[in-house]
């Protein structure tokens, strides 16, 4: 192995195990005598609701808390601290520092969502402008920034679809949403949460929407189609015009899952392709950090005729003044307690003007170039194959199958991923999409310099050689991460399941 | 673009050409040749930029400066509250390894965030008195929505009962969540003197169709629901689930819902070290009992303890994924994927810093400061504070007899003070607003609010 990597391993105890009675990690200001008052606290609180038992939180001093979390951070891998994070469908591009600095500005962190619009013109103007930029990239007519994540955006979009059919008096009839078998799992889950049934259609031999299957599935019960384009094997659905016509002719709506928007910015726009509703993930395409699982943000764009159904309130501009418009009688209601993940929106705004229209287009081009570069070179390796029309260009991601390797050597995609970690490289998305056996879904993004791509390629080649010559080396991975391969079945087993410190004490300490 | 953008390392022409040559193409356009011509966007996207960092910083700062400078932290709550964020919290959550990681799909290289989130789950369990907490929903409002869906799945019933004084924002989200599932939302009356839930009305409406009885403690109006235990007993008579929404900063003083037999706890984790940021990102808390019926129906990610396969060292993984959308697709318990994980880590760091004694002191400090403000404001002529005769925690209602809210708030704004959420649009209490005081407000802040109000009322 030419690349060397060793992740920190602090064997860090749980924060509860660091506790010593009486220690404090933070000090509150002393109360003035007038505020402290004469009456003891326990006499102020009604007895029936007064907390008598100690909360059981650990008591740890400030430096111990800081070091504890510093140690934990060193046992984690981020796109800004690692080497490459080619997690397909997740668009792990560089998370610019300037975004964080701006989102930490006291004039955003200290703003309450129910302040008057007169005192919050800056943030309202930012959100309004972000909405315009979003509409420009996507080719839609109106949008909401309220959904907190991609899936929340999908659901908001499907609720909009529901409200539209209801408004037409057709909801009783239009109960089915058509979804290709290559779709993200959130698509069917979001459709069901919006009250629809899902109809799955198999992809054709090109990994694309099968027009025949679509025609067979569509009918008077069709509410709409959910589609991502380019799709999850990274190929552009070039029959999009025909697909769109089939759905629209049947009275359905076209929903665009914007998870893959990073492939096409400035090249083409979902709105122009016939999509009526879209969501996009600000934490993918627009560079906001994912924080180990969120917060994200999932703005939803629609065509004009669907605008009345979007969530309240809307941000509107009138002669340079920004206000909140609650007067939308057909609105689906609120989808977040306030205005969504505004701090995330500010980071996306900062990113958009850092790139500009031309920079966004160049980003997409380089994301596509990087993916094709990796894919073209690696498909030549014996153990990897590019399924579905290998000669066709991919967009932002390329899905390799480790099927040949599994057959020849017994080493599966899972172990290729685990072995990559030993090089200090993050693994691709594994076993998705479902239509590719032993899938390794690689999305390098435009952020990766050619050196990082070459390192990744080199590691993938070495793993291929190892699989054929010393498979045990791959099957025993990872070795260089904080811990070795973990027992996932044990975590879910009824006898060993442990989801909190309380349970931990019962199980491990016999407490 | 004429300049090489700092975010685009391969935009250097020589590098690009080398890469194209390697994969056998002459131009980037070839990679986009499968997009039908009619859909090719032939203009440049109309978005300003590219801008240099110095320009961006100045532009965004100037934009944010258009937000008015206030003389005190806002006296506003209602689901997002101004609280002090200890510096250690921000330091930890800005670590690139946490901040810029994805969902920990590869647990061996992601033990840091997995342990931090497991600790968040555990810390919240201690605070609310439950055994299981998921690793986050978007906010309190969506947590109530998910709790209603979860209750309906567990009980196979389709009616939820909520207090008529619940937050209108949370109510709106609850209705959006439950409408497609055919769940009916019904309101329970309150006692006009105390504001507490009307137990007779609860008895009448709680029947064999009830999936969930929901209360907020403290209530949206700021008072504690003193009869929480009795409400739980009534709820369980029909085998409905008892769901309690909490403000975690109250739980140093107030009984945790686990102690009065709540089945599910939801709440807002924002005050635990998360900045307000105009209402997001927030942190939806969802906790339940360690009961298979509940755990299997829980939405969202859950982290569990396990060990390594070969040397049996302790480690952490995402678990019970068979409930989730990426495995179960249309049969998943929820569509949630990205959540508020970093905000959960934030809350974990905050709770670790505060500890048991710190949370107790925090609750006491908040309660006493709010009590002081409530007393001073209540002494002003033509003012009633609060309108309900109950124990209040950090928020309280203020009714103005001789002035409209519009007049009062205009006078406050003119002096750089934001205070009092107007309640007159959503409730029938006349000119009444909801005030909030926390540990972040000094005595001087409160005195300034009172003197400004006094002038407004005399004017």
Image (cartoon, coloured by chain):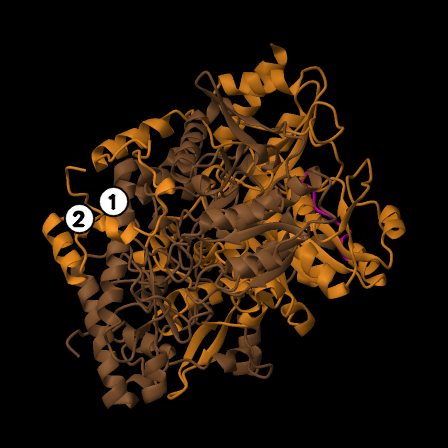
Label 1 residue SS: helix
Residue A174 falls left or right of residue B277: right
Can residue B213 be seen in the rendering of this structure?
yes
Between A202 and A30, the residue placed more toward the observer is A202
Q: In which quadrant will I find the C terminus of chain B?
A: top right
Disc 2 sits on a residue from what chain? Answer: B
Snapshot quadrant of residue B207: bottom right
Which one of the lettered chains is coloured brown?
A
Magenta segment's dominant SS is loop
Q: Is residue B148 left or right of residue A26?
A: right
Residue plotted at (58% across, 56% down):
A215
Q: How crowded is mark 1: few (under 14 residues within 10 Å), some or many (20 or more)?
A: many
Assess whether residue B101 is covered by the magenta stretch. no
Q: Colour of chain B?
A: orange
What's the magenta region? B220-229
Q: Which of A172 and A420 is in front in this view?
A: A172
Q: Is residue B63 above or below residue B116?
A: above
Q: Do the residues labelled 2 and 1 touch (CB within 8 Å)?
A: yes
Quick check: can you spot residue A9? Answer: no
Quadrant in which residue A408 is drawn = bottom left
Residue B201 position within the rendered picture, expressed as x and y whole percent measured from the top left: 87, 46
Q: In this view, does A490 lie to the left or right of B164?
A: left
Q: Name the residue under label 2.
A: B11
- In depth, the one of B32 and B218 nearer the eye is B32
Q: Where is residue A108 in the image (x, y as percent from the top left)?
A: 41, 35
* Total numbered badges shown on the rendered structure: 2
Q: Mark 1 points at which residue?
A: A362
């Amino acid at each position: 192995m030419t690349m060397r990597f060793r992740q920190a391993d602090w064997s860090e105890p749980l924060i509860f195990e660091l506790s010593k009675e009486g220690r404090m990690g933070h000090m509150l200001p002393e109360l003035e005598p007038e505020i402290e008052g004469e009456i003891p606290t326990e006499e102020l609180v009604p007895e029936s609701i007064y907390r008598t038992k100690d909360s059981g939180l650990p008591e740890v001093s400030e430096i111990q808390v800081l070091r504890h979390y510093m140690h934990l951070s060193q046992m984690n891998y981020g796109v800004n601290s690692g080497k490459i994070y080619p997690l397909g469908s997740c668009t792990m591009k560089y998370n610019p520092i300037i975004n964080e600095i701006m989102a930490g500005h006291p004039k955003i962190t200290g703003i309450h969502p129910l302040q008057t619009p007169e005192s919050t013109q800056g943030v309202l103007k930012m959100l309004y402008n972000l909405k315009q930029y979003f509409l420009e990239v996507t080719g839609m007519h109106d949008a909401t920034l309220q959904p907190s994540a991609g899936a929340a955006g999908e659901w908001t979009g499907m609720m909009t679809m529901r409200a539209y059919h209801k408004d037409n008096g057709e909801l009783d009839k239009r109960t089915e949403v058509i979804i290709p078998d290559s779709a993200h799992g959130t698509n069917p889950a979001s459709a069901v949460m919006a009250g629809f049934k899902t109809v799955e259609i198999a992809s054709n031999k090109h990994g694309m929407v099968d027009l025949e299957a679509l025609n067979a599935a569509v009918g008077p019960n069709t509410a709409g189609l959910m589609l991502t384009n380019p799709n999850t094997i990274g190929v552009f659905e070039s029959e999009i015009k025909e697909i769109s016509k089939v759905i629209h002719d049947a009275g359905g709506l076209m929903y665009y899952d914007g998870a893959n928007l990073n492939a096409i910015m400035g090249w083409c726009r979902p709105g122009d392709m016939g999509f009526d509703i879209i969501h996009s993930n600000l934490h993918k395409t627009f560079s906001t950090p994912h924080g180990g699982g969120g917060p994200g943000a999932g703005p939803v764009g629609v065509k004009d005729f669907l605008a009345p159904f979007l969530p309240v309130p809307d941000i509107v501009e009138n002669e340079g003044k920004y206000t909140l418009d609650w007067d939308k009688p057909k609105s689906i209601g609120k989808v977040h307690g306030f205005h969504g993940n505004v701090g995330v929106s500010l980071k996306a705004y900062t990113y958009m003007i850092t790139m500009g229209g031309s920079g966004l287009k160049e980003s997409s081009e380089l994301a596509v170039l990087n993916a094709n570069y990796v894919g073209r070179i690696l498909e030549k390796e014996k153990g990897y194959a590019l399924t579905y029309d290998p000669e066709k260009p991919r967009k932002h991601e390329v899905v390799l199958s480790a099927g040949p390797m599994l057959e020849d050597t017994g080493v599966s995609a899972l172990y290729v991923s685990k072995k990559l970690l030993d090089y200090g490289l993050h693994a691709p998305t594994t076993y998705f999409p479902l239509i590719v056996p032993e899938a390794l879904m690689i999305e390098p993004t435009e952020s990766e310099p050619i050196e990082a791509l070459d390192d990744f390629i080199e590691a993938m080649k070495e793993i291929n050689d190892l699989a054929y010559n010393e498979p045990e080396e791959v099957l025993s991975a990872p070795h260089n991460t904080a811990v070795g391969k973990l027992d996932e079945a044990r975590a879910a087993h009824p006898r060993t399941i442990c989801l909190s410190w309380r349970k931990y004490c019962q199980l491990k300490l016999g407490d | 673009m004429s300049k090489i953008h700092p975010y685009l390392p391969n935009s250097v022409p020589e590098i690009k050409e080398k890469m194209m040559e390697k994969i056998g193409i002459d131009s980037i356009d070839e990679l986009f040749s499968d997009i039908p011509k009619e859909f090719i966007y032939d203009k440049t996207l109309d978005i300003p930029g590219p801008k240099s960092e110095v320009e961006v910083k100045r532009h965004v700062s100037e934009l944010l400066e258009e937000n008015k400078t206030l003389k005190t932290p806002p006296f506003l709550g209602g689901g997002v509250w101004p609280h002090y964020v200890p510096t250690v919290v921000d330091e930890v959550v800005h670590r690139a390894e946490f901040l810029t990681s994805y969902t920990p799909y590869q647990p061996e290289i992601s033990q840091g965030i997995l342990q931090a989130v497991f600790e968040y789950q555990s810390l919240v369990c201690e605070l609310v008195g439950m055994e299981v907490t998921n690793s986050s929903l978007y906010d309190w409002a969506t947590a109530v929505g998910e709790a209603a869906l979860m209750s309906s799945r567990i009980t196979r019933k389709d009616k939820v009962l909520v207090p008529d004084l619940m937050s209108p924002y949370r109510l709106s989200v609850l209705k959006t969540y439950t409408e497609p599932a055919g769940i009916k939302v019904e309101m329970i009356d309150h006692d006009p003197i105390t504001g507490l839930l009307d137990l007779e009305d609860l008895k009448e409406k709680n029947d064999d169709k009830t999936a969930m009885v929901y209360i907020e403690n403290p209530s949206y109006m700021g008072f504690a629901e003193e009869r929480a235990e009795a409400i739980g007993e009534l709820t369980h008579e029909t085998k409905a689930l008892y769901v309690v929404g909490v403000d975690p900063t109250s739980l140093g003083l107030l009984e945790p819902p686990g102690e009065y037999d709540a089945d599910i706890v939801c709440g807002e984790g924002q005050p635990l070290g998360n900045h307000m940021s105009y209402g997001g990102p927030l942190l939806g808390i969802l906790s339940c009992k360690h009961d298979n019926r509940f755990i299997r129906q829980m939405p969202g990610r859950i982290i569990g303890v396990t060990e390594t396969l070969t040397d049996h060292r302790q480690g952490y993984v995402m678990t019970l994924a068979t409930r989730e959308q990426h495995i179960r697709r249309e049969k998943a318990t929820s569509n949630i994927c990205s959540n508020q994980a970093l905000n959960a880590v934030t809350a974990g760091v905050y709770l670790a810093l505060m500890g048991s004694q710190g949370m107790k002191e925090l609750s006491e400090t908040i309660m006493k400061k709010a009590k002081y403000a409530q007393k001073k404001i209540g002494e002003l002529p033509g003012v009633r504070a609060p309108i309900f005769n109950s124990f209040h925690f950090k928020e309280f209602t203020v009714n103005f007899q001789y002035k409209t809210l519009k007049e009062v708030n205009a006078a406050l704004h003119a002096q750089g003070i934001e205070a009092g959420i107007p309640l007159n649009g959503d409730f029938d209490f006349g000119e009444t607003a909801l005030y909030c005081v926390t540990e972040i407000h000094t005595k001087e802040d409160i005195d300034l609010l009172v003197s400004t109000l006094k002038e407004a009322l005399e004017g």
